[in-house]
Amino acid sequence: MSSTSRPAEAQVHDLATFALADGFHAAATACGLKPSGRLDLGFVWSDTPCSAAGVFTTNRVQAAPVHVCRETLSAAAGRVRGVLYNSGCANAVTGERGLGDARRMRALGATAIGAKPEELFVLSTGVIGKFLDMEKLSRGVEALRAGAALHTAGDAARAILTTDTRPKLAEASIAGGHARIAGFAKGAGMIHPNMATMLAVITTDARIEPARLDRGLRAAVERSFNRISVDGDMSTNDTVLVLASGASGAAVDDAGEPAFTAALTEACGSLARQIARDGEGATRLVELRVTGGASERQAHRVGDAIACSPLVKTAIHGNDPNWGRILAAAGYSGEPIEPDRVRLWLGEGDPLQLLDRGLPLGFDEARASALLRQDPAVVHMDLGLGSASAVVWTCDLSADYVRINADYTT
Amino acid sequence: MSSTSRPAEAQVHDLATFALADGFHAAATACGLKPSGRLDLGFVWSDTPCSAAGVFTTNRVQAAPVHVCRETLSAAAGRVRGVLYNSGCANAVTGERGLGDARRMRALGATAIGAKPEELFVLSTGVIGKFLDMEKLSRGVEALRAGAALHTAGDAARAILTTDTRPKLAEASIAGGHARIAGFAKGAGMIHPNMATMLAVITTDARIEPARLDRGLRAAVERSFNRISVDGDMSTNDTVLVLASGASGAAVDDAGEPAFTAALTEACGSLARQIARDGEGATRLVELRVTGGASERQAHRVGDAIACSPLVKTAIHGNDPNWGRILAAAGYSGEPIEPDRVRLWLGEGDPLQLLDRGLPLGFDEARASALLRQDPAVVHMDLGLGSASAVVWTCDLSADYVRINADYTT
């Protein structure tokens, strides 16, 4: 992230120094759900009730833990104690038995920390259509409880990963440094995930009521996770949870809400970009800036169409300034763009213009290629139709993407 | 194509024996638009005026030849003489100059066969955003005219290709064998092409008025080319043209129209499947049969979502019966499917059921894998919501797709 115009990143680079917000504990263990023996069970919890909010997949197929999280949220958004999560098995498309398993998982976690079942969230990620091995899970929760587990926030962040090549961590400070937001995420599917699960667990020690937290989370997600994923194009398990312990004592009131939402957006944006950057097989982050839209929705949809185009993503992978593919993707976005108003640049700071009002400019191909090689590769399209804009993030598409996905379950 | 349930294929396997419908001439040459020296200029024409119909891309960015084809169609749908086409350059995003070039190309072709400019179609395919080399093109048309060209229909079918690995040919007989439909196509982008151009030139020696031909073509395209390509997801150049010479003397009247449309649909369906089968890097055709839809549109949209999913396509490439990805794609199709009504099978004839009313069945993974290895790989989803159905074709997604597309222009 060498950008000058991008805000100071909330990204945390060091697993060892990563810390959750005050008031939260972390634990992680390997209970055998992942055949590799890697960490596959994690727990983030508070000793006291937290405000909580969640945003969930819009897929018609929703995994059992998503149902259970919704139950928790409606039962106890003001007194949630934590989130127990596993990787290695998504507990999706598992019917009534899966729902029962998710509720049992929740009860196991709740017992472990002396909470009521409806005060806990559960998350699962991994292979779809397999039942959770409840015996392994149960032994795993015992291990977390017995203190035989790892206890840093970094361990907890690692236990949620599947095909990710690295953990995703973010933090932001609020209330003049008196309170913090800190969270982690997983997700490494092709960006604009078709169904690669995206999960995020965010903690804050601010004191904030559930309704305000919900409002802030929805606003933050709209500008972050929803900018790497098309609405309706989400996996069966996608979930973003935020828990507020209040341990800092710093209260978020009407006056403080905008700053809190901004900080939460910063943290979510960082996690979202880290997910995009770690797209399966990806070699770089791609930042698509669409300006000059008649509406933000239009700019977002045009950016989405470009970000979803395998032809654009392969061209960027090949450092090929194939602006024709970019323009054509905008052309089929469903938005009534006017090709003869479109301008296109690569790079930032001193960008290189490729297209002016729909017509190709002569440009230095070597320089264009070098700009695409940057991380992030920045593509800026101005639609010339208005003043609305949107930024969408994706990654390049490499042959490794295919290799990773051609035999994920077998 | 080993299917038993699929209709006898209109596919023609032999370039040498392929023939256009009666009344049409063919010519092809290499005029240098392709650096490789391969055939890049083709011409199909009739000595007498033909009925004509065309279906064009819905992309907001439309190439110059698409504009010019529309002009021809509105000026002379009842007396079109032929179609001149080139590969190696798409003449797209070329502004006024490109439009002038396309009109000049049309005039060159018209002069060569003694027609008026408005009696000719032109098609271009290849790299976007480059101007046509009119000097090479002009010399090429001279070569076609001078008889220095190749003159079989197979040559004409080869001259339209770009990244295709093989020509696409189809024919069908009508009027009890007294008349024929014969055509060729190009297209080898990722299926559900984001912008990989799909072109088809279809000839018939039936006698049919333009309005009837137009009606038949639209119906045929809806069940063929539109089943490998999402509406609004088309390239800047996509075009399907049909020319009817009337040379057989067999007239298509009200009574004969259904049979004509069926034959045209058969030919278009074959070309569409050949395009899907030749998707860049593809190793097999994938046939998605969606039944039990509340409407055909719903079945089509669910099939489209599955066909567009890179995760589904990579899983099929890896012979991995990852039905979770298939179900999740249906779940984000935008259609209100009911996961607990969905059933899923692989294969045809004696299919293997993977999912029953939303729940995974135990199944023989080796057999499932073997069924995916078939060409075509058949996936059948029943939505359990009604009695409408749709078939959508796609291909698997291999690492070669990325290699082909990462450096197409450079």
Image (cartoon, coloured by chain):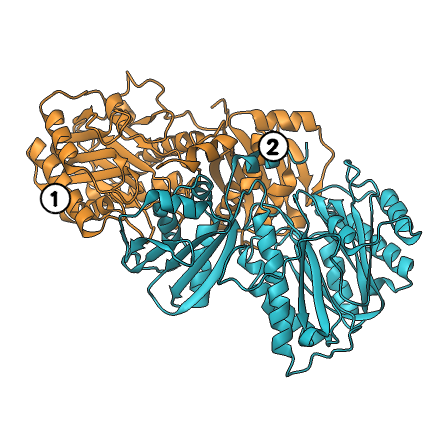
Chain colours: A cyan, B orange
Tell me the residue at 28%/45% (across/down).
B129
Asked if both marks, 2 and 1, belong to the same chain, the answer given is yes
Say what amino acid the circle numbered 2 marks: Leu
* Above or below, B410 relative to B60: above
Q: Give the residue number, with chain letter if any, for mark 1.
A: B118
Quadrant in the picture for residue B7: top left
Q: Residues within 10 Å of mark 2 (few under 14, many from 20)?
A: many
Say what secondary structure mark 1 lies in. Answer: helix
Across and down, in percent, residue A57 comes to 63, 57
Total labels drawn: 2
Which residue occupies the foreground of this view, A351 or B391? A351
Q: Is residue A10 left or right of residue B295?
A: right
Instruction: Work out whether mark 2 precedes mark 1 in sequence or the reverse, and give the earlier one.
Output: 1
Q: In this view, does A118 lie to the left or right of B275?
A: right
Give residue B346's mark. 2
Quadrant in the picture for residue B133: top left
